[in-house]
Amino acid sequence: MARVVGTIGKPNFDEGELADGFEVRWMSLVQAEECIRSVATNDYLGRFVTDRELTILEEAKKYL
C-alpha cells in the first residue's frame, strides 16, 4: 500500500521474485482485498501470507 508522489519508477525485484512472477499492480483497497481472497493456495506458508495481507488491508481501511 502506498501513495505515489512524483514519477512511478520501475520495481527492483530480486531473481527469486522474478522467477515467482512478482509484479506491481495498482488497485483500490477493495480490489486488493478481492484479489487476495481470490487466490487459492495449498502452500503452508502461502496461507499465512494471505492472512497477513488481509489483516493489513483491514487495518488500513480504519485509517484511510
Image (cartoon, rainbow, N blue to C red):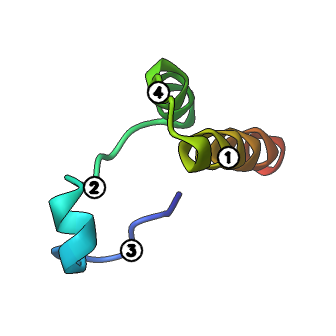
Residue 15 rendering spot, x and y as whole percentages: 18, 77
32 or 28, nearer to the observer: 32
Mark pair 1, 4: CA separation: 20 Å
Disc 1 residue type (three-letter)? Phe
Amino acid carrying label 4: it is Gln
Q: Distance between the residues labelled 3 and 2?
A: 16 Å
Query: Residue at the spot x=62%, y=38% of the render?
Result: 47
Q: Which label sits in the foreground, 3 or 4?
A: 4
User: How far is disc 1 from disc 2 in space, using C-alphas?
Assistant: 21 Å
Three-letter code, disc 2? Val
Q: Is mark 2 on a helix, strand or loop?
A: loop
Q: In this view, does 29 lie to the left or right of 63?
A: left
Q: Which mark is residue 31?
A: 4
Above or below — where is 2 with respect to 34?
below
Tag nearer the camera, 3 or 1: 1
Q: Are marks 3 and 4 in contact (CB under 8 Å)?
A: no
**Disc 1 designates what residue?**
48
Q: Which of marks 3 and 1 is nearer the N terminus?
A: 3
Residue tagged 3: 5
Residue beneath disc 2: 24
User: What's under tag 3, amino acid-wise?
Assistant: Val
Residue at 57 percent across and 29 percent down: it is 33
- Where is residue 63 shown, x and y percent of the image? 81, 50
Q: Residue at x 24, y 80 (%)?
A: 14
Contact (Cβ within 8 Å) of mark 1 with mark 2: no
How many C-alpha atoms fall within 10 Å of the one at disc 2: few (<14), some, or many (≥20)? few
